Amino acid sequence: MTKSELIAELSAANPHLLSRDVELIVATIFTEITAALARGERVELRGFGAFTVKRRDARTGRNPRTGEAVPVDEKAVPFFKAGKELRERVNHGKRTGEAG
Amino acid sequence: MNTVTRAHLTETIYTEVGLSRNESADLLETVLERMCRALEAGESVKISGFGTFSVRQKGRRIGRNPKTGVEVPILPRRVLVFRPSQVLKAHVNHTPPPAGDDE
């Protein structure tokens, strides 16, 4: 599913809305999540999951082609952890054993 | 640290789009539910400029209870992974977005 397919599904399910508005709704959701993460905040949507920002320390990387050492700066990476409900739905409620 | 929730997103849709708060909340829920359904069906969800959610199949492996050291089988399962787009990564780092590619 792509963003445009998502918009098309929503439009079909909500014939009273202009497709322009449906596009705006979808854009608003992802723009707002992006903005929150850029502010260093976390976004928690129960049942769906949580978006957070993780810090990665500076390290010495290596150019895989030449083997040359290159410094990699400290950086932030967006991270998503699926919520319990979504995790179970994706796994179709299969038991995963007791480990972890 | 502040946490953004459904209530915040609903409020943003309400102010940006001008729907009622109720309808804004319903639409947010519908968006999340449609994404969940696609993922549940094993389909990837690709949101350009944001990232891709995909389902990965994991094989059976032997795990260990870290507390007791007892070996337990971890059954094959499907897990969700999120790959942020270059645009989202750039936003989080306050660096200029990459030209062209917005995956």
Image: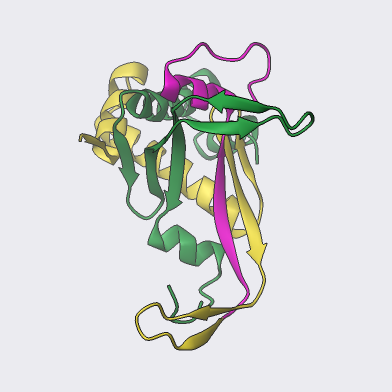
Chain colours: A green, B yellow
Q: Quadrant of residue B69?
A: bottom left
Query: From this viewpoint, which residue is outermost toward the front?
Result: A68
- Which residue is painted at 39% across and 30% down in the image? A33
Q: Is residue A21 visible?
A: yes
Judged left or right of residue B83, residue A17 is left
Q: Position of residue B103 (x, y in %)?
A: 66, 27
Vertical comparison of A88 with A77: above or below: below
Q: Quadrant of residue B58?
A: bottom right
Query: From this viewpoint, which residue is outermost toward the bottom?
Result: B70
Q: Quadrant of residue B98?
A: top right
Q: How many marks?
A: 0
Q: Position of residue A8 (x, y in %)?
A: 61, 33
Vertical comparison of A98 with A44: above or below: below
Q: Is residue B95 magenta?
A: yes
Q: Which residues are magenta?
A: B74-103
Query: From this viewpoint, which residue is outermost toward the right?
Result: A65
- Which residue is painted at 70% across and 27% down in the image? A68
Judged left or right of residue B54, residue A65 is right
Q: Quadrant of the N terminus of chain A?
A: top right
- For the residue pair A22 and B98, the one nearer the viewer reads as B98
- For the residue pair B103 and A13, the one nearer the viewer reads as B103
Q: Is residue B101 magenta?
A: yes
Q: Position of residue B63 (x, y in %)?
A: 53, 78
Judged left or right of residue A79, residue A9 is right
- Which residue is painted at 52% across and 18% down in the image? A20
- For the residue pair A5 and A66, the one nearer the viewer reads as A66
- Which residue is painted at 42% across and 81% down in the image? B65
Q: Is residue A23 visible?
A: no
Q: Quadrant of the C terminus of chain A?
A: bottom left
